[in-house]
Amino acid sequence: MKKELLLKMAEKMTATEKMLQDAVLDVPRKSGYFDKRDIYRYAYHASFFIENGIAVLALFGTKELRVEAKKPVYILFFDRENEDFITYETERRKWRKAMVSNLLQFDWNYQMDMIHIEDDDYQRLCEYFTADAAEHKKTQRIADEFQKGIHQKRLETKWKVETDRWDAVMEKVPALPKDWKHWVEKTGVTEHFLFYDAGKRVKEGYCSHCKNTVPIIKPRYNKRGRCPRCGKEVTYKSRGKAGTVVTPIEDVYLLQKYEGDRILVRNFKTQTFYRKGNYENPENHCHEVWRFIFDRENEQIFYHGLYKQRVRRWIKGMPPGGLWTPYIFYLHKGRVYRRTIPPMKNGLLGKTGFPEMLAERSVINPEKYLSYWQAHPYIEQLIKAGLMPLALNLFDKETKIEWGSGRRLCQRLGIDGAMLRQLRDNNGDKDYLEWLQMEKRQGGRISDDLIRWFLANGIPAEKIGFIRDRMRPEQIRNYLERQWKKDRRKKNKNSYADLLEIWRDYLSMAEKLGMDTDDEIIYRAKELVKRHDEAAFLLEQKRKEEHIAEMEKLFPELPLICAQVKDQYEYLEEDTYAVLMPREVRDIVDEGRALHHCVGSGDHYFAGICRRESYILFLRKQSDLKKAFYTLEVRPDGTILQWRSEYNRRTKDEKEVEAFLGRWKKAVRDRQKQQKAGKRKSQKVNSLALLQKGQAQEILPENTAGEAVDVKAQEDRKAA
């Protein structure tokens, strides 16, 4: 439709005398007590005519007609033959493509008779749109249905271009194996039952796995056992008590070759229903939810869902919610149909290491493995080189290693041939490899026993880096063992890893106190814990404000980081204890002074917070939240590295505190899971610029001790 011609038609449109008279007689009423809008019997008066095959519907507002405005508010043009429509808004002189239902924005006060049209015009309108002329005139509904039909056809044409591409990909998906259903019922579903008739003389039952009647002895309801015939683990269920038994929803996977050398991974959800009275004929439900197509570089994802809220079909991409949909495919492990694997070993699948990994793991997520392999292809080389423990460790923790250059595997791992044999013989994981890499970099040899000792006591290679330039690993172990014995005689319970942390903290403080940390008397103190406490005391004697100013200058981002993670780690839900997050450098320094330990003295802990490697938290009694009780050092995942009270000791409430920390850790991990699932959004804080402008009091009105923060005093100290 040409807009110039339509505008000429619009110029002819003017209100009739009858419209003006009807509008004057249409006395408005108020819509409600609070809403004072005027409500008319008819919101609009309409006229309709046809010219050159174009239908014109002019809408005159009753409110405008009452003040003798004769121009229509909207003029709607319809072309039935070419399936087109357009609207002209006269007041703003604007062309619009909105449908009538959206254009008029129907108010709930109006019914479908909000537009008044004369009988002759209404008859012509019904004939043009081939609609039934109902007794109750539904002008806007007839026009709206015509527009919706056109709009729907346009959308379907647009969508078909997209869905045809997807269908072309899905048409190449191979058929399911002939024994797929049997395999799912037997192997894919891992929960099986042994049904029996309760009674003192019961001697046999029905196994749902092998589908045979088997002898049983003294069964107990819901007791776990094994079928005496097939050996499968089963749960005993009494026929009279069990009712309908339903297995949990489980994942099963099918790998198939797809178009050339690509890999198709199909994810199914399966569940079995055992109906009461018909346990011998279970109903297995198995439906496909995901399809993943892999080549060396790319991955295509399809999910079965509701397309445009109209039809269920295969859709390319991630569903609304991304990974964190109800399926959460990335986290789900399942059993893999193995009969399609051998024929695929000669293709791309054989170059991924997945067949070997599948031989090691009966339950796995193939999509997760292949995605990991695409990002870190060296995992296949590790598996085929006999380093399965290392490969499993990397895959399970979704971590990586530094992969160097060179033709030989040992060169790429940063070790030599003898170390590679040592790694393989000891089933070494990533931590073991890091010890060997450190040994290679710094020279010398570290025995298997020595590495195992460090790993057994939770000491990775990186932890001894602070002293490695002055002592060999054997000397470090011997020193820690001597200090551990002395610590035990004093009835302290520091582990070897705790003592190593105390040692590092001591040397950090000694260096700040101007001591020569290269002197053996200093770095190899005979009474480590005692020297540590003395260093902490001496360092505490420094001017507190000077130290706080220094730390604030070194770590200006610390308050912002603490505010960002506060909701994740603070815990106030119990009556006995609480966990609080510091808000600024001053809080941590005050904590160290109150408990006479080094948490606020050295810069090690502040640097850890700013690097987001570890966080300092305060454990307090609910009865006195202002009084320092315990200080915690935790990793981002909630793992507790240290928890110490006064003088790095623990109190008589140790067991009770330890139980509380277990509950706190669970709460933290639950929060982190909720954040990953999109169910919890972290509270945003103001930028660091607000702190630098002196507005910290608005963001952090109090420190963790409950004392008001004097912003002006802080500014004066900074200026000084």
Image (spheres, rainbow, N blue to C red):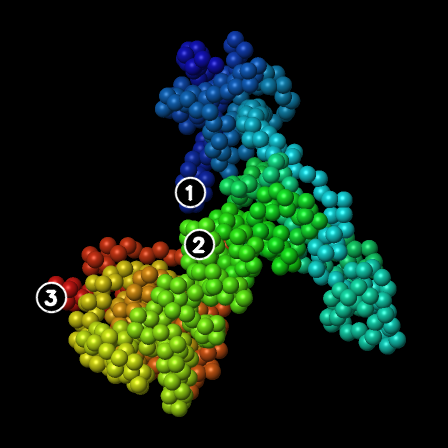
The reply to whether residue 135 is visible in this rendering is yes
Label of residue 720 in the image: 3
The x and y percentages for residue 202 are: 87, 73
The reply to whether residue 480 is visible in this rendering is no
Residue carrying label 1? 35
Q: Is residue 598 left or right of residue 111?
A: left
The C terminus, quarter of image: bottom left
Q: Which of 693 and 175 is in front in this view?
A: 175
Give the residue type that dot 2 points to: Arg
Disc 2 is placed on an element classified as: helix
Image quadrant where residue 565 sits:
bottom left
- Between marks 2 and 1 in the image, the one whose residue lies nearer the viewer: 2
Residue carrying label 2? 412
Q: In this view, does 374 lie to the left or right of 468?
A: right
Disc 1 crowd rating (10 Å Cα; few below 14, some 14-19, many 20+) is: few
Q: How many angstroms separate mark 2 from mark 1 (CA)?
A: 76 Å
- Between marks 3 and 1 in the image, the one whose residue lies nearer the viewer: 3
Is residue 103 depicted above or below 205 in this figure?
above
The x and y percentages for residue 718 are: 15, 64
Image quadrant where residue 244 sits:
bottom right
Give the residue type that dot 3 points to: Ala
